[in-house]
Every structure is written in C-alpha cells, then in structure tokens.
Image: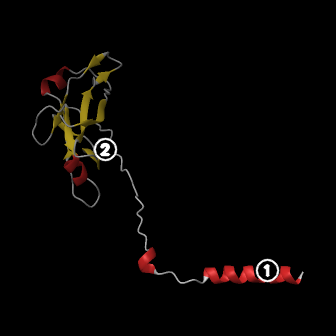
Amino acid sequence: MKYRKFAIGLTAAALVGAMALPVWAQENTQHKDTTIKATVESAYTLSIPAETTIAFEAASTDLAGVLKVTGNVLPSQEVEVTVQAKAFHNEAQGTDLPYKLVNKADGNVFTGDVWDEDTLRDGLAGEGQGKAIQLSIAIDEKDWELAKAGAYQGTITFTAALQDKQ
C-alpha cells in the first residue's frame, strides 16, 4: 500500500512538473489564419407616386410624388423600370379618356428608365438625392371637350427588374 501511495504521488508530481515546464516561444511560435467571409446581395427599393386626382380640364397634372429607385447593386448590374399606362376608363359610359404619362423634366412621353449602381447609391439616405423623376398626366383640351360625363379611373403599372448591364 505504501508503494502504491508513493507511485501515485510520484505520478502526480511528474504531471505537475510537466505542466510547469518552460516553453521557448522562439522555437514554438505558430501563426495560423482564419478566413472570414460575407456576401451583400444586390437589393433595391422602388418608390412610386401615390394616387392622384386630376381636375376637370387640367392640361397637365403632376403625380403625387416621384418615381425613384434606391439601392445597392453590383457595378455590372442595373435596375430597369418600365411603365404601362392603362386606360383612363369611365365605367358608366363605357368610354376612355386619352392621356399621356410625361416626364415633367423633358416633356417627353415616359415609358421607363434605368438606374445604375452609382445612381442607386446616390439615392441612399445621407448620400445624396439620386435620380427622382416627376411624372405628369397630360390630357389634350380636345379630349376633355369630347369626354363623356362620369367618373374616370385608370392605373399606371411600374415594373422594376434587376438585370446585367447591356
């Protein structure tokens, strides 16, 4: 039994001594790297004008708000916005009132536009205004004169798509 206690004590002393052995940093220095990764996906936000009421006989009416796209995309990508201006229809009379969707800045009929990486980022909060387009509804005087009585309602559909630059 004494021998056993002595052996256990000797083993314990050897283990403690082994843990306390000095390590020479110069001889045992190791350098290892860990790689970290992240992916920021392309994303954008389309903002469109709100519902707008057009006054009778108004030749031009600005839509309530602007068309704007903001976001963060790759330099090789862009966001294309297309527009479909649907009929301005009078349900009771079964007739349409012709109109044009116009870019107020240049007076041309608006069918869509493209926002690239720089333009999208310029529109982000704190980084600038970006590209905002004020759209207007233009109705000719002769079309107002021919319009039948009643309420008219129409829809403008804005479609945005992320695509590779062409």
Q: Is residue 23 above or below residue 72?
A: below
Q: Given the image, on which type of amino acid does mark 2 rest?
A: Ser
Disc 2 from disc 1: Cα separation: 81 Å
Front: mark 2 or 1 = 1
Identify the image quadrant of the C terminus: top left
The residue beneath circle 1 is 7
The residue beneath circle 2 is 47
Q: Residue at x 68, y 79 (%)?
A: 15
The foreground one among 103 and 166 is 166
Q: Is residue 25 above or below residue 161?
A: below
| Residue 139 visible within the image | yes
Residue 64 occupies quadrant: top left
The foreground one among 65 and 7 is 7
Indicate left or right for 32 with 96 as reference.
Answer: right
Measuring from the top left, give residue 78's x and y in whole percent. 23, 40
Q: Given the image, on which type of amino acid does mark 1 rest?
A: Ala
The foreground one among 78 and 10 is 10
Mark 2 and mark 1 lie on one chain; the one further toward the N terminus is 1
Q: Residue furthest front?
A: 3
* Structure colour scheme: secondary structure
Residue 56 occupies quadrant: top left
The foreground one among 144 and 89 is 89
Q: Residue at x 29, y 34 (%)?
A: 158
| Element carrying mark 2 | strand
